[in-house]
Amino acid sequence: MSEADNLEPYRSKRDFSKTSEPPGSVATSSEGKPRFSVQKHRSKRLHYDLRLEVGGVLKSWAIPKGPSLDTKTKRLAVPTEDHPLEYIDFEGTIPEGEYGAGSVIVWDIGTYENTTTADGKEVPIGEALERGHATFILSGEKLRGGYALTRTGRGKNERWILVKMKDEFARPDHDILEGKPNSALSGRSVDEV
Ligand code: MN
């Protein structure tokens, strides 16, 4: 599948004459480190969308309870359609009646480093995700250090688990979602966009 085709599910869900979300152009690979963001999205239910830049698109997961700094906390991550790279810093309100209607802020943004290995060899992030297990170090405004994403089901039941890895940035007793609730870009709350 070409990168442009990867965005077809994303585009087919949205009416770009109504939503201010980006339609997405043909992807060009960015220079330097790949980026990530976590968007806080108040739609029917408040959730957090993790997006990792992989192969010219944003691989995406909806995390109902958001990321945790506690290495013992497993957070359910439900895969969603690939998003265009331009979505990484999207903040705004998706109109009532449209897909994902509600407000979105960039809760965290930064770069990541793939640290996935198998049999002592580095595994490219795209391949790691296809295999169902990836580890990476986040360098965000809020999230730092290692995280692991692991697939637990396939097909319609595809689910992933996001876990904080043990390192100096792990903090079992700190709720960063409560502590730093606002946009990393604009300082706005999800009710202010
Ligand atoms: Mn969402």
Image (cartoon, rainbow, N blue to C red):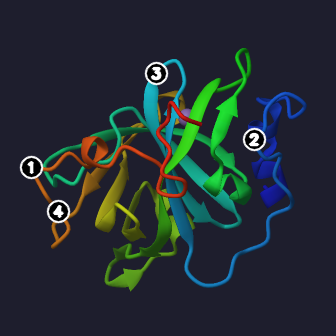
Alpha carbon distance from label 2 to label 4: 33 Å
**Mark 4 residue element:** loop
Residue that badge 3 annotates: 45
Alpha carbon distance from label 4 to label 1: 9 Å
Name the disc covering residue 173, or none.
1
Of the residues shown, which amino acid type is indicated by label 1? Asp
Q: Position of residue 156 (x, y in %)?
A: 53, 28
The quadrant of the picture showing ligand 1 is top right
Query: Nearer the N terminus, badge 1 or badge 2?
Result: 2
* Corner quadrant of residue 117: bottom left
Question: Can residue 84 be seen?
Answer: yes
Q: Closer to the camera, 69 or 92?
A: 92
Question: Does the closest atom of ligand 1 sit within 8 Å of the Cβ of label 3?
Answer: no
Label 1 crowd bin: few (<14), some (14–19), many (20+), radius 10 Å = few
Name the residue at 51% across, 69% down. 125
Alpha carbon distance from label 4 to label 3: 27 Å
